[in-house]
Amino acid sequence: MSKIDLSGEAAQVAHLRRTFDSGRTRPLAWRRRQLQGLRRLLVEREPELAQALHQDLGKPAVESFVTELGFTRSEIDHVLSHLSRWMRPTRVRVPMALQPARARVEPQPLGVVLVISPWNYPVQLLLAPLCGALAAGNCALLKPSELAPATSNILARLLPEYLDPDAVAVLEGDADTTTALLEQRFDHIFFTGGTRVAKIVMAAAARHLTPVTLELGGKCPAIVSDGDLRAAARRIAYAKFINAGQTCVAPDYVLVESSRADELLRHLREVLLEFFGTDPIASPDFGRIINRKHFERLVGLLGHGRVHVGGRSDAGQLFIEPTVIVEPAEGSELMDEEIFGPILPVIPVAGVDAAVQRVRAGPAPLAAYVFTERPDVHRSVESGVRAGAIGINVCAAHLAVPGLPFGGLGPSGMGAYHGKQSFETFSQLRPVFSKGTWLDTLRVVYPPYTRAKAEI
Ligand code: NAD
């Protein structure tokens, strides 16, 4: 258990608040400098960051680039190219009764924000929210996950070299550290993680009436109807088994029309062979489970159905083979909890309507995917399913489009970010209304309320 030093956390937040109150984080030039610094860090320190990610999660370098370092760079580039426009006030039409006057909305920074991140994409999920926070002119306190210690350490060491150290601070630690931190008042809390901890964070935020963004998880379904099932199998397997299945938007399970189930299962078997070979433990392209606790939880899930492909594991290497399970036990942990590992249950269903009913019966997932070339099937999934996002013939890729807001719904999250949505999440969209005194048109509504005024 880490020792809590409340005064340390309070002093750190107070320091960030002094920086914010000085006004130096507001100008476009300061914001751009921070974003450029963040980008430079990702370019210049790419080998060290990739090494830390490999140490924590066995991430292959290409995966680290695509899903963490390159991904965050693209997000920064997108924000840099639009920021000055986003910062501009927007004029709003004034109703005739209030004219002559002017109305505008001007984005304002919120103040000092707290970003709490998980271990599965420990660079992206710390730095992409930070990109939004800095773009909006805030100071930020970052709490990386203690379960990815190599990445947490390197970011804590490097960030002050690349960013204004009076405006961005990193506090490393576990639940105790975070508990102490949550005693402090922040102007916004951006949390990525699981629903259990999200409730703790939201309850702590409520004590200060601090608004929260919650980026959570859930069981994302992939509904397979028709079309090229080989392509579907590749896209499902890629999104499922990247980062050894430890991805919030990974397809958690597949619902396939029963007439196509055998064909899909055959393709999944062949695609896994194509991706990782006959002995995936020897593949340099497949990651590892974060720790022993999660490894044991996942090994326990392997028994909740019949293994169609995969199923082997190695505790010494925290390796679980990419696994497809058929006939999963309904009501088991495999089918009721977010899997968050390389195990994919495939369930035949009577048709798309049955699949939609099944998804609707559960909590709203972070994303729902459908594989079909038929517009009526798109439409019935889009109108029937409640989810943070819909992917048609592709899984997880929506989050790489910076123009799309990324977030969940209900138990899968609250609020959203990426691109302009990040800027707005970390801004107050402040209305300003101004009217000259030279023509006092408002007089018509002042008391006394004569009959003539009531008839206006
Ligand atoms: P977690 O909720 O256990 O931890 C997240 C953060 O909260 C960590 O920094 C941790 O130190 C801190 N924390 C842990 N216990 C705490 C407590 N009692 N009080 C205060 N803070 C505490 O999540 P995780 O295991 O790191 O990540 C996995 C979860 O995150 C999955 O459910 C996954 O779906 C979700 N996730 C969501 C997204 C998204 O973008 N929506 C992305 C990645 C992961």
Image: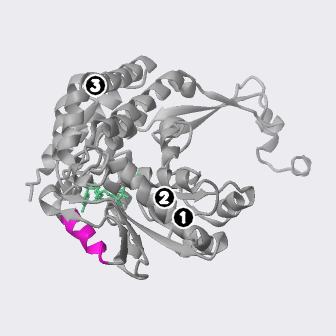
Image quadrant of ligand 1? bottom left
What's the distance in space between the residues labelled 3 and 1, CA to CA?
46 Å
Helix, strand or loop at disc 2? helix
Residue at 26%, 54% in the rendered image: 279
Which quadrant, please, contains the N terminus?
bottom left
Callout 3, which amino acid? Leu
- Left or right placement of residue 290 versus residue 214 in this view: left
Dot 1, crowdedness within 10 Å: few (<14), some or many (≥20)?
few
Residue behind mark 1: 263
Is 162 on the left or on the right of 264, as rendered? left
Farthest-out residue, top: 29
Whether residues under marks 2 and 3 lie with C-beta atoms below 8 angstroms apart, the answer is no
Residue at 64% across / 29% down in the picture? 90
Q: Is 297 inside the magenta-drawn segment?
A: yes
Q: Is residue 339 above or below residue 122?
A: below
Count the numbered circles shown. Answer: 3
Q: Which mark is residue 1?
A: none
Mark earlier in primary sequence (2, 3): 3
Q: Nearer the viewer, mark 2 or mark 3?
A: 2
Which residue was labeled with disc 2?
267
Give the residue at mark 3.
Answer: 41
Residue span colored magenta? 293-303
How far is disc 2 from disc 3 in space, using C-alphas?
A: 41 Å
Q: Is residue 20 left or right of residue 107?
A: left
Q: From this viewpoint, is residue 283 visible?
A: yes
Q: CA distance from mark 1 to mark 2?
A: 6 Å
The disc labelled 2 sits on which kind of residue? Answer: His
